[in-house]
């Protein structure tokens, strides 16, 4: 039976708007809600300023279909506030060739129990107290911790996000069909070992891989501590 594309598109939009509206209603009502947010290809979080307490970040290597090894960071913040929050994702609609951008914006937000996995972060970062950097060679990961963190003009390309409690002020939800802009100009994932096998055969019949090894401790972001113990950084895509 032929599919009515107009009705399909309308149903698709209504379903997504309904789900996001329910989440927004729970959050603005101040209800404690476990809110996992995931999507194919991830989603983007942009904000004017984020202030968090109890900060930890782990950088490690992950893999999925099409890329065996690529860098991922997981950030955990106990509680905090966000000014000028904008969260959005672009959805490729099945059947049609349309793209739908679903956006959530709020003037102010407060949260508890933030757990976020991301592949790209940009912004101006300041640690109000000394930060601790640790390396775990056995598990190929790095850990950064600090009691407080502030990020200004931040943009994060995420994979998943989990929030124990979220409260949003002046919430706005928008759905845009075929947006003009591309969203955030984030770099492609730094895939270091394709599952399609970037291998080359040598003369003796053996195969050698073109993927790189784990880099040294300097392969993440550049942090410059000041005399008062604070630190500022412009965070680039994580290169492992």
Image: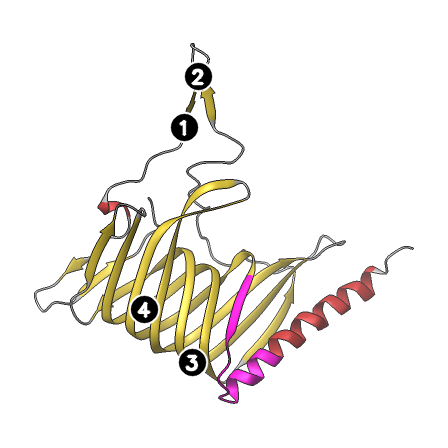
The x, y position of residue 29, in whole percent, is 52, 89
Q: Residues within 10 Å of mark 2 (few under 14, many from 20)?
A: few
Q: Residue at x 48, y 88 (%)?
A: 30
Can the viewer see residue 237 in this picture? Answer: no
- Is residue 76 shown above or below 112? above
Do the numbered discs 3 and 4 sit on residues whose CB atoms are within 8 Å?
no
Q: Residue at x 28, y 63 (%)?
A: 124
Query: If you read the primary sequence from the N terminus, does the residue marked by circle 2 or circle 3 appear first?
Result: 3
Indicate left or right for 134 with 140 as reference.
left
The x, y position of residue 112, in whole percent, is 39, 78
Q: Nearer the viewer, residue 222 or 36?
A: 36
Q: Residues within 10 Å of mark 3 (few under 14, many from 20)?
A: many
Q: Secondary structure at mark 3?
A: strand
Q: Secondary structure at mark 1?
A: loop
Indicate left or right for 106 with 223 as reference.
right
Is 81 part of what is drawn in magenta? no
Mark 4, residue position? 152
Mark 3, residue position? 109
- Eye-nearest disc, 1 or 2: 2
Q: Residues within 10 Å of mark 4 (few under 14, many from 20)?
A: some
Can the viewer see residue 223 in this picture? Answer: yes
The circle drawn on residue 206 is 2
Residues in magenta, as a range: 22-38
- Is residue 18 shown above or below 40? below
- Eye-nearest disc, 2 or 4: 2
Do the numbered discs 1 and 2 sit on residues whose CB atoms are within 8 Å?
no
- Eye-nearest disc, 1 or 3: 1
């Amino acid at each position: 039976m032929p599919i009515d594309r107009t009705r399909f598109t309308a149903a698709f939009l209504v379903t997504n708007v309904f789900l996001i509206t329910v989440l927004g209603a729970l959050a603005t009502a101040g209800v404690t809600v476990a809110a996992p947010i995931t999507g194919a290809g991830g989603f983007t979080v942009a904000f004017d300023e984020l202030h968090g307490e109890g900060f930890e970040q782990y950088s490690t290597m992950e893999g999925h279909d099409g890329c065996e090894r690529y860098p991922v960071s997981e950030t955990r913040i106990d509680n905090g506030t966000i000014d000028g929050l904008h969260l959005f994702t672009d959805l490729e609609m099945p059947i049609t060739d349309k793209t739908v951008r679903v956006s959530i914006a709020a003037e102010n937000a407060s949260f508890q129990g933030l757990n976020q996995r991301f592949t790209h972060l940009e912004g101006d970062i300041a640690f109000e107290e000394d930060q601790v950097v640790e390396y775990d060679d056995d598990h190929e990961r790095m850990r950064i911790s600090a009691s407080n963190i502030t990020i200004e003009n931040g943009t994060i390309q995420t994979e998943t996000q989990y929030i124990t409690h979220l409260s949003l002020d002046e919430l706005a939800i928008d759905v845009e069909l075929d947006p003009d802009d591309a969203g955030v100009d984030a770099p492609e994932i730094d895939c270091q070992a394709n599952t399609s096998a970037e291998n080359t055969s040598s003369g003796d019949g053996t195969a050698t891989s073109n993927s790189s090894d784990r880099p040294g401790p300097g392969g993440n972001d550049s942090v410059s501590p000041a005399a008062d113990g604070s630190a500022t950084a412009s965070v680039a895509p994580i290169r492992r």
